[in-house]
Image (cartoon, rainbow, N blue to C red):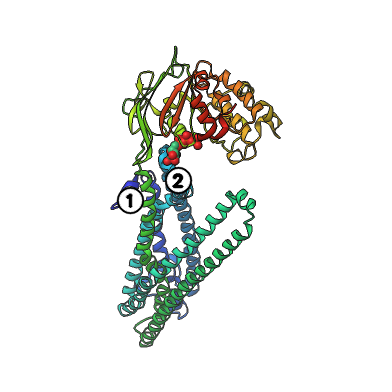
Amino acid sequence: MNRWWLRLTHHVAPYTLRISVLVLLVLMGAGLTVLMPWPMKLIVDYVLTAEPLPENLAWLNILTGTTETTGLLAWLVFSTLLLFVVNRGIQVLKAYIQDGVGNRMMYSLGGELFDHLQRLSLRFHNQRQNGDLVRRVTTDSGCVRELVMGVYLPALTSLASLLVMFAVMWYLSPLLSVIALLAAIPLPVLIRLLTPRMTERTYVQQEYEGQLMALAEQTLTGLPVVQAFAQEGREEQRFRALSRSTIKAYLRTITAELQFTVGVSSATAVGTAAMMAVGGVQVLNGTLTVGSLLVFLTYLAALYGPMETLAYLTSSYASASARARRVLEILDEDQEVKDAPGALVLAAHPSGQVGHISFEDVSFGYESGREVLHNVSLDVSPGETIALLGPTGAGKTSLVSLIPRFFDPWQGRIVLDGTDIRDIQVASLRNHISLVLQDPFLLPLTARENIAYGRPEASREEIVATAVAANADGFIRDLPQGYETPLSERGATLSGGQKQRLAIARALLKDAPILILDEPTSALDARAEALVLEALERLKQGRTTFIIAHRLSTIRNANRILVLEEGRISWVGTHQELIEENGLYRRFCSGVTGDRLKE
Ligand code: CTP
Ligand code: MG
């Protein structure tokens, strides 16, 4: 992971101008901070003592236009005010630009990551936790902001102010400068010594907080199960136990931080005392003015900030780089399913018969070493309806998932109208396929938007007509706001059968030449199933259709029935043949899939 930041530069480059302005502001700010104690010094040294200004400061008299001490005082008071206002102004402007640019960089990287994630294969997503991926997109993408605004810019600010302060100190009194340096040395040492402990404890605390969040989230997601098994008490116990650990960890973190603060202030106090002693003697000797001593003491207090920043730089860098690693790990993930160079774009509105699909000796599995489909060969004519039947886990869903290239086969190929589907542009292939998934996933949009998801430009009439065809119109109209009713996440406010009919409407509206239905009627009773089947009869017209079902009633009208067992096609024939082949029918009725195949 060397030079990881080189791979993020394209998220920084567009802001070069604004970052340059930021650098300028930083340098101006450092200069002003150094100037801050000077009016006070001049007041103490020349106004209060009524001493004339030394030659190298005589130009001040020209500025004020008077040699009167009151005039000088008024001018110095005014310049203090001015310094303060300008310094604040610069800081506000700096914070504004810094936050703006920082967030833009973060969301630019977050956007790239989100886009990439969406395009990664379902195989990848099956193996990952959504929560973790969400954190990478929304939080870890802040690494680029952290790097620029948390490492490079603070490094520049701190170095600039330290250098300028030391130069001024050296000019005033080399001896005191050395003391200031000695007083400052314990700071980085302390930071080095105590930071690992603080980091470690903060990490433990964050771990506990993460666990607490995960527990709350999991319990709320699985609430029906928790309530059904009356385990609220146990979950509460777990929550309380975790809370106690979190509090303990938090207190340990605080203790470490307090130790650090005490150490730092002791070092500063010792430094201040030493400087007061040595400086006091110098003032008595007349080798140093009171005002200069004041400047020194102010600088000593101001040294702490930049030195702390510098000492933390490595850990800020480490944190940014750890996050960047989590981001780049995903960006490096190869998009398994992607367009081949020169991929064929299918015609949006094909003329003539389309939808001729052949599986040629296809083998496939999800993880290496465990093949799920073995040497499947199948030729489906355009407009034909194929029913897939088979025990649970036989590979029915896997087989149809290969057609829209959710996964690519390990071996063999799938050919659509003469072209290997791997040579077809993925988006155009998927535009040719309407899917009703086994688990009809709905998005948190309105009923109308859900139906029109694949064709957002569809008119309201088309949407309603489709819903009517899918026998969904009735229940949608009964929803509180009809078609405009927002559905909650995953359509939790609908019944299983209603969700299925909505998903069928969604597939219907897409109007694609290939139709894949994975148990579209599994959640329906006989009457509702009859309604959906009637809708499907209309939908299937002229389309190549794959329908997976457990019930014979669902597949009665299929042209061919295909029985899949343990990833192999074990039987192909018509409904009539299936009934006549007594053995097979009996086998289905009595064992493998239970009695669901009975009519
Ligand atoms: N499988 C897997 N990883 C997945 C999905 C499935 O390893 N992401 C495995 C399952 O464990 C199963 C095999 O692939 O052994 C076939 O699964 P699937 O095609 O989903 O079976 P179906 O025939 O669709 O089963 P069901 O009737 O239960 O839907
Ligand atoms: Mg399945």
Which quadrant holds residue 237? Answer: bottom right
Pick whichever, 226 or 569, lies toward us: 569
Residue 21 appears in the figure? no
| Residue at numbered disc 2 | 107
The x, y position of residue 92, in whole percent, is 49, 56
Residue drawn 52% across the image and 26% down it: 585
The answer to the question of whether label 1 and label 2 lie on touching residues, with beta carbons closer than 8 A, is no
| Residue at numbered disc 1 | 5
Q: Dot 2: within a 10 Å radius of its alpha carbon, few (fewer than 14), some, or many (20 or more) residues?
A: many
- Total count of labels: 2
Q: Tag on residue 592?
A: none
Pick whichever, 135 or 221, lies toward us: 221
Residue 262 appears in the figure? yes
The x, y position of residue 508, in whole percent, is 55, 23
Q: Circle 2 sits in a helix, a strand or a loop, which is it?
A: helix
Taking 174 as reference, is 116 above or below it? above
Which quadrant holds residue 150? Answer: bottom left
Single out the residue that lies furthest toward the front.
583
The x, y position of residue 95, in whole percent, is 47, 55
Q: Inspect the image, locate mark 2, and give the three-letter code of the amino acid beneath it.
A: Tyr
Q: Circle 1 sits in a helix, a strand or a loop, which is it?
A: helix
Single out the residue that lies furthest toward the top.
352
In 3D space, how far apart are the residues under numbered discs 1 and 2 (Cα atoms)? 16 Å
For ligand 1, tell me if the residue under mark 1 lies within 8 Å.
Answer: no
